[in-house]
Image (cartoon, helix red, strand yellow):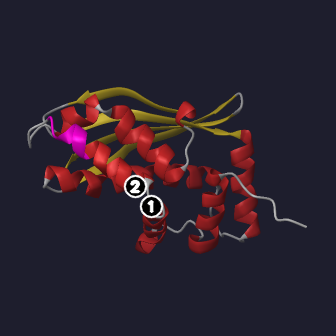
Amino acid sequence: MTKKTLPPFKSMIDRLARTTQFKTFGDVLRNAMVAEYKRKRKGYPAFIRAFKRKWGGYNANQIAKCIKDNTDLVFKTWFSGMFYFDPKRLQILEPNTRSDVDFNAKFHYLFTEDEVRFIEAVIDKYKVQSVKPLVVMNQLIITGLRLLGPIIQEFFTRPYDFQPENVQDEDVPGGKLVKIFFSSREA
């Protein structure tokens, strides 16, 4: 009997549940998500090269403009390539620069009903205590956003950070829509 192979997104969720129990303290989840993107032996270097090419057209104080001009690369490519989010269900709405270094936008992602049920199942499977599926969904996105900061910092050469400002969710036909308004700025 062969073991059923999970799609990459679900495999990642299962791995994170098993290895981290979705714990955020002590950077447990963060470190596991770093390991996830570093597993992409071709994808991660390709993302860095693509961003480096884009960054070459901007001066050192135009990081917010660079992010806004390259929203799909920065967010959709990052989340779909490094963490297997479906780019068709990911939207970056109202990207805005408030200054040369301050950027904000709305991040929307639709988790399908199947994905929500799968997250519930891995929480049960690994007996993860005090964690609800919505917390997992929020933390995957928030941690993924926060992990962009050190990467952008490499190009910007100053500390840079992404912060959630407001987190909401909505039950919609087909799943759960997670909506995060976030900002990024020089740290």
**Residue placed furthest toward the top:** 94
Provide the residue span drawn in magenta.
52-57
Residue at the image point whose x is 19% and y is 32% from the top: 65
Is the C-beta separation of discs 1 and 2 under 8 Å? yes
Type of amino acid at the residue the image marks with label 2:
Tyr
Q: CA distance from mark 1 to mark 2?
A: 6 Å
- Residue 187 visible? The answer is no
- Residue 35 visible? The answer is yes
Residue at the image point whose x is 64% and y is 71% from the top: 18
Horizontal and vertical percent for residue 177? 59, 35
Along the viewing direction, whichever of 62 and 27 lies nearer the viewer: 62
Horizontal and vertical percent for residue 81? 48, 47
Horizontal and vertical percent for residue 118? 73, 53
Element at badge 1?
loop
Horizontal and vertical percent for residue 157? 13, 55
Q: What type of secondary structure mainly makes up the magenta span?
A: helix
* Residue corresponding to mark 1: 41
Element at badge 2?
helix
41 w.r.t. 99: above or below: below
* Residue corresponding to mark 2: 44
Q: Is residue 181 left or right of residue 150?
A: right
Where's the C terminus, which quadrant?
Answer: bottom left
Is 58 magenta? The answer is no
Type of amino acid at the residue the image marks with label 1:
Arg
**Residue placed furthest toward the right:** 1
Residue at the image point whose x is 52% and y is 36% from the top: 87
Indicate the quadrant where residue 86 lies. top right
Q: Is residue 74 left or right of residue 137?
A: left
Indicate the quadrant where residue 3 lies. bottom right
